[in-house]
Image (cartoon, rainbow, N blue to C red):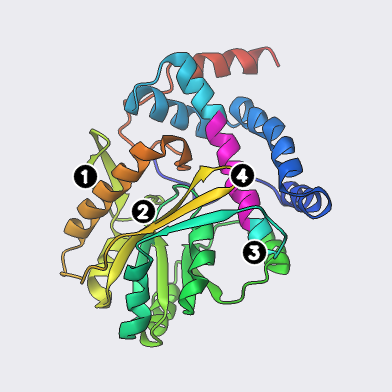
Amino acid sequence: MSSWKGKTRGGLLGYKIFIFVLRRSGIRAAYALLRVVAAYFVLFAPTASKSMYAYFRNILGYSTAGALGALYKNYYVFGQTLLDKVALMAGLKTPFTYTFEGEEHLRRFREENTGGMLISAHLGNWEIAGFLLKRLDMRINIVMFEAEHEKIKEYLGQVMQNRNINIIPVKQDLSHIFLINKAIRNKEIICMHGDRFVEGSRVAAVEFMGKKANFPLGPFTLAAKLGVPYSFVYAVKDSETHYHLSATPLQQPNGRPLEILKAYAGSLETKLRQYPLQWFNYYEFWSEDLKGGIYEKQQHEVSTHS
């Protein structure tokens, strides 16, 4: 069974270069540089490219040419979301506008003084979703894997201006559970992803985009046990300069993680069909028979001639 390895590809130098361009020349200049970087990843990130090519070709049914074109666009939009996050959180001037759908649901966390849990996905720009939630005037705790590159996190922390967002790293000693419970006692918000797991995690296979897919059970078990309301939230790009933030009505935990997972999978599928290019889960998400096909062949040809 394939799984995510716990690290996001990309180096510290790359972040520094893009932040330099953002500060000196603005977001559009950084986007222009990104077009070259996206082409590089199509050719030289074979594991991620194979899995995303299979998603476009085998799940969404794109033609061969259509899947390769979508793969390039996917890398390009992914890079945009990273640049947008850094620009906004560093307080740089940006042209972005936003639409909020379901914000009234999230305001109930504050009005009812319960704290709560938000379950998001690697769809669109989840970091922007957390950043924009500062409108709620509540502390947001984003739970992420400890294996993310520490130097990159440290450097980004130097340029971030918003201090109402806290990172809770997932560790093998389970200390993150104590921090999550502490945040809930303080009536704060917990934000987690529900669409990615690492080797050794408890998973459950549910119907997703027409095929069985493995999802982590951890976020949904937590939602079932915390005893606070939860919502599914997403932030996607409607255009290069416009974001659409959405939240589902608050649900009360029922003690049944699998039911919460199935509801989440249905919600995520609806969003994914609306924004197919904005899913950034770069590993083989569905069953082992989803191979890269022609992409594998082309990648082999690139490797043997380089």
Q: In the depicted view, which residue is nearer to us: 253 or 4?
A: 253
Residue shown at 67% from the left, 29% from the top: 40
SS for callout 4: helix
SS for callout 1: strand
In x, y percent, where is residue 174?
41, 72
Q: Is residue 243 left or right of residue 302?
A: left
Mark nearer the N terminus (2 vs 1): 2
Mark number displayed over residue 126? none
In x, y percent, where is residue 244?
46, 52
Residue shown at 49% from the left, 15% from the top: 65
Name the image quarter holding residue 41.
top right
Q: CA distance from mark 3 to mark 4?
A: 14 Å
Q: Quadrant of the N terminus?
A: top left
Whether residue 170 is visible here, answered yes or no, is no
Q: Amino acid at mark 2?
A: Gly
Q: Amino acid at mark 3?
A: Met
Mark nearer the N terminus (3 vs 4): 4
Mark nearer the N terminus (2 vs 3): 3
Instruction: Name the residue carrying label 2.
Output: 200
Image position of 56 with respect to 121: above or below: above
Whether residue 28 is visible here, answered yes or no, is yes
Disc 3 packing (10 Å; few <14; some 14–19; many ≥20): some
Image position of 180 with respect to 194: above or below: below
SS for callout 3: helix
Instruction: Name the residue carrying label 3.
Output: 89
Q: Nearer the viewer, mark 3 or mark 1?
A: 3
Instruction: Name the residue carrying label 4.
Output: 80
Q: Nearer the viewer, mark 2 or mark 1?
A: 1
In x, y percent, where is residue 146?
53, 63
Instruction: Name the residue carrying label 1.
Output: 206
Q: In the depicted view, which residue is nearer to us: 162 or 53?
A: 162
